[in-house]
Image (cartoon, helix red, strand yellow):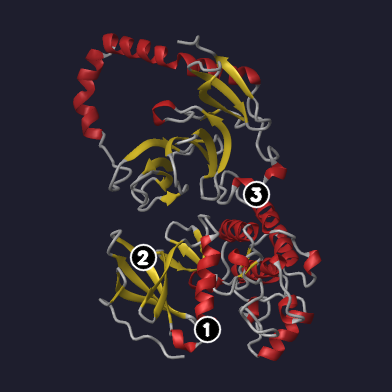
Amino acid sequence: MASHSLIPGQTLGHFRLTEKIGAGGMGTVYRAWDMQLQRDVAVKVLKTRSGGVSEHRRLRKEALALSRLNHPNIESIYSIESDGDIDFLVFELLSGCTLADRIQGPLDQASIVTFGVQIAGAVAAAHQNGVIHRDLKPENIFVTRECGIKVLDFGLARMAVFSNNESTQSIEQQGTLVGTLAYMAPEQIDPGVDDERSDIYSLGAVLYVMATGRRPFGDTAVVRLIEAILHEQPVPPCSQNPGIAPELQRIILKCLDKNPDARYQSAREIAIELKTLLPQGALEPSDSRTIPEEKGRRYRRLLVPGVIAAAFVILATGFLLYRAVSTRNARTGHEVQRSNATATSSRMRTVPLTSLPGWVQYPAFSPDAEKIAFIWNGENPIRSDLYVQLVGGERPLRLTHTEHGVVCCANWSPDGQKIAFGRCEDNGGGVFVVSALGGTERKLTDVICPFGDSGYPKWTADGKSLVLADRCVHDGPRGIVLFSLETGEKRCLTAPAPL
């Protein structure tokens, strides 16, 4: 199929191509400048419209599939465009490398598990929205500079439901193999029927490659490779990489079972089990909704209720205590401060944690002081979103994608794995939680939000409740409320009288 002859500096619609950054079976990918919105984007150009209807339909199918998905571990699509006889997709521009480039041998277990949880979260989100990827492989998985995962290339995806009463029939002819053979499930080859569990098999193959540096079946001859996929068992990963745990090997081999009924039946199950292998204190990178079954199972019961009650008292009286201590220090410490001023200024220096354009608000350090969460409007000028960044890191990781409303008041969970925040919208406010390494946010409860600030959530020391600012009395002012994460119950701690 002939290709369009495009060169840097050429424009397609309101996009100016700046450099070629990749090429594949469907077309070529360019870095481009969006002259309307003044931002860098990625543009995938179909090779030629005259090459056949199927290629154009694939481009449209990829756009339709991605338009259904809004997940931090799935590449975002902006639009599908045409300029004359050239069709192209516009995506977010990613910085980093593919997982295939990252794998130069077996990865360490922490990386395998961290990446695996994020990939499983993306696959689960796709399946929940009726999209089966059908071509999961390291080449279609991107690792950003912040070590976040982005699943790419939904050109071969099958959607369970189409809009406008379109048929669910695949665009490929019956009997044609769809996907990349080395990562295909047996049922995709014989008899050629696939469902969500085929993606589970492919995910297992990706985990296998991360764990061993090799594919489950290494034969390059097509007939021999098909025979191995259909009838042979892969070499156990631990025999090739003794550094991985037997439990991780069990997860991988269960994904690769030749019987779809014996595999995991959902990607969420894989995420749940992989998370149990994360190092203690490690951040969980996927959707907190993927683990409702293990709610509270891995959290320590650290403190007795009396300590929690003390925390509430401190919260309610903190301002008065602060004023009292500040006044005392002003009276008694003035001379000490003056005598030490020169020495202190010579030892201390101000270090900027961020140098981002726009405005940054509500900074909050993680419990280990290695990360900072904040609200920034840099990628969403009209609104704002929650970000997290390593102290000393260059680029923040975006945790939310706000379409309507104002985000505020980030607060870390005691274990450093989640961040609670508030959001005010036209129809009211709410308090949400999201994993500190990305994932789908989860709404916890509704709250009122005067002045654009929603809830001011603060975790209790045991991680089982949040202290919120919310209305205790109908039509009354805000008071202090204890919200249980386990039961969803609210209990008023203070209830100011109506004004």
Q: How far apart are marks 1 and 3 (CA)?
A: 39 Å
Residue 310 screen position, x and y as percent: 56, 16
Read off the residue under disc 3: 290
Eye-nearest disc, 1 or 3:
1
Q: In the rendered image, which quarter is residue 242 located in?
A: bottom right
Q: Which mark is residue 41?
A: 2
Q: What element carries label 2?
A: strand
Furthest toward the front, the residue is 164
Q: How far apart are marks 2 and 1 (CA)?
A: 26 Å
The amino acid marked with disc number 3 is Thr
Foreground of the two, 347 or 320: 320
Amino acid tagged 2: Val
| Residue occupied by mark 1 | 53
The first of marks 2 and 1 along the sequence is 2
The x, y position of residue 326, in whole percent, is 33, 14
Residue 355 in sight in this render:
yes
